[in-house]
Amino acid sequence: MGVVPTPTRRGPIYHQIADELRARVIGGDIPRGGKLPTEAELTAEYGVNRQTVRSALSVLVNEGLIYSARPQGYFVRDGEPMYYRPQREFRPQPASPEMDRFMSDHSDLGRHPTQTIEVTIVDPPAGIGERLQLEPGEPAVARRRVRFLDGEPYNINDSYYPLSLVQDTEIMKPGDIARGTNQVLTDMGYEQVRAFDEIYIRMPTPEEAERLHIGPGTPVACHICTGVTADDQTVRVTLNVLPGDRHVIVYERARPYDHDADDQEG
Amino acid sequence: MGVVPTPTRRGPIYHQIADELRARVIGGDIPRGGKLPTEAELTAEYGVNRQTVRSALSVLVNEGLIYSARPQGYFVRDGEPMYYRPQREFRPQPASPEMDRFMSDHSDLGRHPTQTIEVTIVDPPAGIGERLQLEPGEPAVARRRVRFLDGEPYNINDSYYPLSLVQDTEIMKPGDIARGTNQVLTDMGYEQVRAFDEIYIRMPTPEEAERLHIGPGTPVACHICTGVTADDQTVRVTLNVLPGDRHVIVYERARPYDHDADDQEG
DNA sequence: GAGTGGTCTAGACCACGTA
DNA sequence: ACGTGGTCTAGACCACTCG
């Protein structure tokens, strides 16, 4: 019944086929962006049913190693991720205050940044209300943005504010705010002096997958930033959703350190 | 042909079934840790073939929402992630220098931390050699650790050093180093004054999945830390692999900031 | 032994994009 | 028109764990 490529057959057939195809890809036999054999060819090559071949291929798709482009076939994934730099230090105002850092960072690189902004009053999603210290049922204002580079979605950036705080302020205005929303809050007497950052890693929800054009096998990082005033009042929660195939989160630490989860072993 | 649950049928049947089951889980009809109907029951309920039901369930498994525990059935995922805190600031030596931060952080919480350490001379994996500024073929020393909490794998922590730098030093010794490896390097005249951090998000390799007991639908964060001396010499690269279902990366920013990828919109 | 999910086969029809 | 992958059915055997 067909060629048995691995004499040491371990586990189900589709695992063996997936292992061999993975080795071909990683070993460079099939280059980046290259085309895999068709399902029919693999069916003949391994002498198994088409569904078995499909099971093997779906393993690699779910690993994010390959993708299918019907009806052209399966291809090895390619593409370098962008850099995502959480801001660590106080820095001077940018040259053009009407353009935010995302916009100015990327327009330098010859890429064309665009974004959509939408402001709504919402019942805050799970987790957001708690971080904003809202009573159950208390509404929040959501400034939702999707950012694009050269027309491709780059990330989701949704900021939430207590409605009681920002009602009838500039923050409710859809569209750019020249000063920046944090400055608006500062001018209102709510300067943020601390921020808590959390990064969760998970698979996208179907809604996120659609909003960001995320394919199978692609996780997202969920960066939640909570801004707090000197009075320990939470005035803002920002939710960033970053597709894993398009981002590297990078930052630099300028001071020496002695103890680090990375490398210290007492 | 069975009950059609959604009068507005969009897309393939297994998507519709997956959507309905997802709604049941998210809506709380099936609580955390609760059991889903069996494949046979769903087959009867929806009047479709078992493979169609399995396709729907595999969608939710790959989203990380449910898991299967044969032969008990499918269950809604549960479990709170641990905190992972990249160190940001200089901090004093811990009370017990022979125990690293991972160990002391978690023994406080009534969890039992353990780790395995293994030191080998290796041809550095892709990406590591470049970061260490090694010539092609030049070997590196790998200190590989897997850390456990209560016997369950928590993360992978592999540090790489140029062999030419650390040959015949304490770093080659498998097992704990009382001073800490960074202190050893400092005492050798290679104090690290800067570090570059990169976080990649992706699905685990099969080897990582096995080493860390990672189930389907669980992405990993890959935290790469590159330590540099005042002479711009790279003396260490650490590779952390964190399963997404067991970690939240958290940190606090103590200074105000005006421009931030999170929230600034000029 | 009974019931679960895991794997595999055989065959069929469809939607889609390219040629 | 053709070949691609996407979906679906029908039926079968297996390994495992539980009662």
Image (spheres, coloured by chain):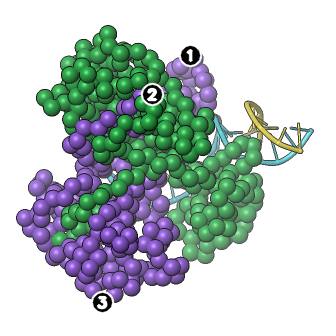
Chain colours: A green, B purple, C yellow, D cyan
Residue B71, image x, y percentages = 39, 49
Residue A98: assigned label:
2
What residue sits 57% from the left and 70% below the top? A9
- Mark 2 belongs to which amino acid? Glu
Same chain for marks 1 and 3?
A: yes
Label 2: chain?
A
Label 1: chain?
B
Residue A232: which quarter of the image?
A: top left
Q: Mark 1 points at which residue?
A: B7
Residue furthest to the front in view is A95
Residue furthest to the bottom in view is B168
CA neighbours of label 2 inside 10 A, class few (<14), some (14 to 19), many (20+): some
Q: B97 or B2: nearer the eye?
A: B97
State how far apart marks 1 and 2 are (Cα).
48 Å
State how far apart marks 1 and 3 are (Cα).
72 Å
State how far apart marks 3 and 2 are (Cα).
57 Å
The answer, for residue A261, to whether it is visible in the render is: no
Residue A7, compared with residue A213, is above or below; it is below
Residue B168: assigned label:
3
The answer, for residue A162, to whether it is visible in the render is: yes
Q: Is residue A192 left or right of residue C7?
A: left
Residue B90: which quarter of the image?
A: bottom left
- Mark 3 belongs to which amino acid? Asp
Residue A43, compared with residue B76, is above or below; it is below
Q: In this view, does B40 lie to the left or right of A265?
A: right
Mark toward the viewer: 3 or 2: 2
Q: In this view, does D6 lie to the left or right of A224?
A: right
What residue sits 23% from the left and 68% below the top? A264
CA neighbours of label 1 inside 10 A, class few (<14), some (14 to 19), many (20+): few
Element class at badge 2: loop
